[in-house]
Amino acid sequence: METFQGQRVTENIYFCPDGKYRWVYEFPMLKNPTILLTLFKIFGIICLCFITFLFIVEVFDDGFMDAVTGYLLDPGILIVPGILFVLILVGYFFLAAAYGWKYMVLFEMDENSVSHIQMPKQFQKGEALGWLSAMAGAFAGNYSAMGAGMLAASRNSMTSPFANVKKVIGKRWLHLIKVNLLLDHNQVYADEADYDFVWNFITSHCPNAKIKG
């Protein structure tokens, strides 16, 4: 199988002439709850820290038992988390609507790292797939310029060097592979037809990582 001119290695993944594997994942924001669950987790930790801090203050002021009965067992303690829960849910719904109920991510992966690049909401999947297909068969010219322009228009990106990865967690039912560094947590998505290739590549290139999944 020739790789010099670039090749399609799975249904949606291309090996490009610059030595990088690239694929586009179109994320259905209502069907796949990963982002929403991540938001709940983040704000849940914030609420827990806030409640713990106030509990410690109550312990110093009124004693441990009074703090438990008068603060932790008070139903009012759930008001702030409840409001945050509703606000997150409503905010996520409006965000999903603004993105047309989905957003598109471009992934780049080579021997050293994997990158998660969020594309602007107006970018169409057909355009991205056309660029990937072209890049897989050409070294330079307009296709490279098109690719550079597309990356320049991206909203944000995250790159995870494999040597620094501490944990790799697979969640196949969500099409998700979590690539976690000490502080940064990268989320890599792949369709069912591509999942095994991406999983095997990442896990085999992360020598210092704990593998779960």
Image (cartoon, grey):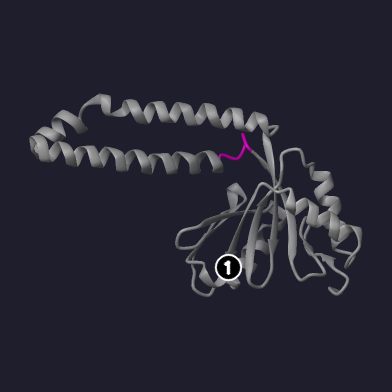
Total labels drawn: 1
Q: Please report the residue visible at 49 percent of the width from the left and 40 percent of the height from the top.
A: 39
What secondary structure is marked by label 1? strand
Neighbor class of circle 1 (other Cα within 10 Å; few <14, some 14-19, many 20+) is: some
In front of the other: 33 or 145: 145
Q: Is residue 203 above or below residue 38?
A: below
Name the residue type under label 1. Pro
Residue 104 at x, y = what percent?
70, 45
- Residue at image mark 1: 161
Q: Is residue 9 left or right of residue 81?
A: right
Q: Please report the residue visible at 25 percent of the width from the left and 41 percent of the height from the top.
A: 52
Q: Please report the residue visible at 21 percent of the width from the left and 33 percent of the height from the top.
A: 72
Q: Is residue 140 left or right of residue 67?
A: right
Residue 104 visible, this angle: yes
Start-end of magenta stretch: 29-33
Q: Is residue 165 above or below residue 101?
A: below
Tell me which corner region of the image, top left, top right, bottom left or bottom right, holds residue 133.
bottom right
Residue 200 visible, this angle: no
Magenta highlight on residue 31: yes
Q: Main secondary structure of the magenta part?
A: loop
Q: Please report the residue visible at 64 percent of the width from the left and 68 percent of the height from the top.
A: 201
Residue 155 at x, y = what percent?
66, 46
Position of the N terminus, as image quadrant, is bottom right
Magenta highlight on residue 9: no
Residue 198 at x, y = what percent?
66, 62
In front of the other: 153 or 95: 153
Tell me which corner region of the image, top left, top right, bottom left or bottom right, holds residue 108.
bottom right
In front of the other: 47 or 194: 47
Residue 135 at x, y = what percent?
85, 61
Q: Is residue 12 left or right of residue 90?
A: right
